[in-house]
Image: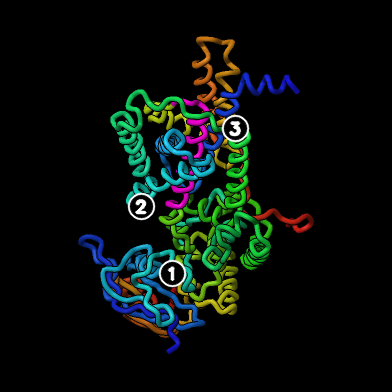
Amino acid sequence: MPWLDDILWTYQTLIHSLGINGLLALSMYVVLAAGQLSLGQAAFMGLGAYTGALLSLHTGLPFALVLAASALAPAVVAAVIGIPTLRLTGVYLAIATIGLGEVLRVVYVNAGITGGALGLNGIPGRTETWMIFLALGLALAGAFAVGQSRIGRAMEAMRSDGIAAAVMGIDRAAGQLAALLVSAMLAGLAGCFSAHSASFIGPNDYAFETAVTILSFAILGGTGSPLGPVVGALVLTALPEVLRPLQDFRLVFNGLIIVLVVLFLPRGVVPWRMPRLGRLPRGMAP
Amino acid sequence: MTALLHVTGLSKRFRGLTAVAHVTFSVRAGHIHGLIGPNGAGKTTVFNLISGVLPPDDGEIAVDGRSVTRLPVHARAGLGLARTFQNIRLFDGMTVLENVATGAHARLTATLMQCLFRTPAWRAEERRLREQSLELLEVVGLRDRADLPAGDLSYGEQRRLEIARGLASAPRLLLLDEPAAGMNPHETEALARLLGRVRDRGVTLLLVEHDMGFVMKLCDWITVLNFGRCIAEGPPAEIRRDPVVIEAYLGAKGAARLACGESSL
């Protein structure tokens, strides 16, 4: 089907972005679902992107290993900032992760190996569309499976009432740290895909603005289920393209749509809440 | 020694205020044990110390002879300790049934990998959990509310859901912080029957309660606190006649009324 190939080729960047942003949205969801706010998803993504790009440019590692390394590097950093901040509640993690983003940006600008302010060029295009969507599909399936188990219930419990959750035997600090690590891995993976799709990365690609965009995926989509943030990412990624005929006004409309959703759909465009215990078998309903 | 819970010399100060001072008592296995005292006597603080929500300044807490004083809150659930809260703390967004299932967290064994791949062992555990949770809802009379959000329940129903959630971990000792608060007499009577059934299932109960009729009728043993100190201990029949308790509770006037045979204790 040549017409399909045409579409895929023409819109390849957009299609890649849809999947990558879906992964980023899921990484945001995992943190939010455990009751924490991280503004470091862009920083974790950047770590994955730089790790992946440097490995591809300087070593002959197969892409699977590059991806694995790009997921692990941000997880290690997440552990370093997560362990001291997770004992605290509230906005401490958010503040620490904003700081992380800024620190990393300065490192990228000043370190020689990261190409300074010019970033890294000529990253091989190793990302294939199927890889992104396979990763997104697996991550989504994993989020659903875990979310509907005792772990998912524990996460919602610690988000809902940390003290009551602890009394139920739920280790909040460990649970939230684990969620942060998984989230950093997903963001790192997304960063690696994006670096090998765009062929160029720069230090300003992973700054505060990107972190807020990733958060807005989750807010727009809703956090009742893993599906919400992914749908939010798809909408917010496709919207600028759909609004292209509006030319200069499209950013205005883009912002307007977000404001309207927050005002009138506080639970997001996917308000459905994932059940945390298997459904009642038919005929057993009370 | 049949003491399931042993509290020795427990003390807690909040800045200048001594909330709990050298409190010592034991809860025998199979008993319904009442912890009573006027407002501000330190009852809820004792609960927070036993459940680990607050760290004590001094003293020892042992469950079944094993010290739990230095264990974090979440580690105590696995030793058979569960509690409810005076100011109800349900997981509001979850359904009634999910709240109960979450209460069972400590005794579930599924690992991350089992959850991720939905193995037969995981499925079997979740199926049993669902059945057990529904059964507990039946016990507290909330079976027909199973799929409602917990936040939609009435006050009395939320209290009963807290009890069901506390029982879900199959605890040996359940701490109940004012379980009858805000209930009408009819609901209180039903609660007394419910707690009797819970004890008959082999769960030891330690409860803080202000409804004296309820406490005197239900409890096997009572410890009385006043100003953070233990002022009396004994079976209900003794406690209700103890002049120290009557005065702490009712003041001199009430004590006089009680002497005229107008018993409210």
Name the residue that disc number 2 marks.
A83
**Percent x, y for residue B249?**
35, 72
The residue stretch that appears in magenta: A176-200
**Percent x, y for residue B143?**
67, 60
Looking at the rendered image, the disc whose residue lies closer to the viewer, 3 or 1, is 3
Numbered badge on residue B76: 1
State the quadrant of the C terminus of chain B. bottom left
Same-chain status of marks 2 and 3? yes
Residue B232 shown left or right of residue A267 in the figure: left
Within 10 Å of disc 3 (Cα), the crowding (few <14, some 14-19, many 20+) is few
- What's the chain of the residue with tag 3? A
- Predominant SS of the magenta segment: helix
Residue projecting furthest to the left: B16
Residue A103 shown left or right of residue B99 in the figure: left
Residue B2 shown left or right of residue B167 in the figure: left
Label 3 secondary element: loop
